[in-house]
Image (spheres, grey):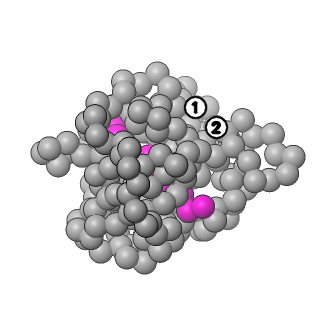
Amino acid sequence: MNKLTFFTVLSLLTTSCETDDHTKSTGKSIKADDSIKANLPADFISQQTLGEAISVLEARKRNEANQLLVIQGFIGGMVEPFIQSRALFVLGDESIKTCDKIKGDQCPTPWDACCEDRKKLIDGSVTVRVLDDQGQMLQGTLKNVMGIEAGKIIKVECIVDSQSMPSSMVVNAKRIELL
């Protein structure tokens, strides 16, 4: 995994709905709303089931390079689970307590997990990337592309990246099933 991917994911995982330090310190938002959209192959979103899937927590136990997995989880765990200029998002384990699961919570980003323990959040998350034919990350955000949205529960057919680390699992998506 290159350093940019690692530090981007790390910064995503430490952002919550309670603070907006990045915007305050830089004057720039990390939101992916106004970004160029990634150009995905027409068959990237599977119309058929991807079959039986494992949880994000189980996938982290199988964090071995080049292993083919089908992982089920939700897109989120932080305010903005997408990257503005790259085809990357964070997939969280369904056991993570998001804002929408907290009675009376008024957080405007219900897929966020700002009240969850940070270690549990990091241990229960996987970075999902989409690569081009040359093995480079696609340019453009995946946010709102072909039904890919924050909070959505999905299955991802993927291969564990050769540079994935125990502290930060990275997978390269082949197909996604929207649930």
Above or below for 113 versus 150:
below
Q: Residue furthest front?
A: 48
Seen at 47% across and 46% down, the residue is: 178
Say which of 146 and 102 sits in front: 146
Q: Please give the residue where the numbered disc 1 appears in the rendered image.
A: 23
Other residues around mark 2 within 10 Å, as few (<14) / some (14–19) / many (≥20): few
- In the picture, residue 44 is in which quadrant? top left
Q: Amino acid at mark 1?
A: Thr
Q: Which residues are magenta?
A: 85-94
Q: Is residue 3 visible?
A: no
20 sits to left or right of 167: right
Q: Please give the residue where the numbered disc 2 appears in the rendered image.
A: 20
Say which of 92 and 80 sits in front: 92
Cα distance in 3D space between marks 1 and 2: 6 Å
Other residues around mark 1 within 10 Å, as few (<14) / some (14–19) / many (≥20): few
Q: Is residue 174 visible?
A: yes
Q: Amino acid at mark 2?
A: Asp
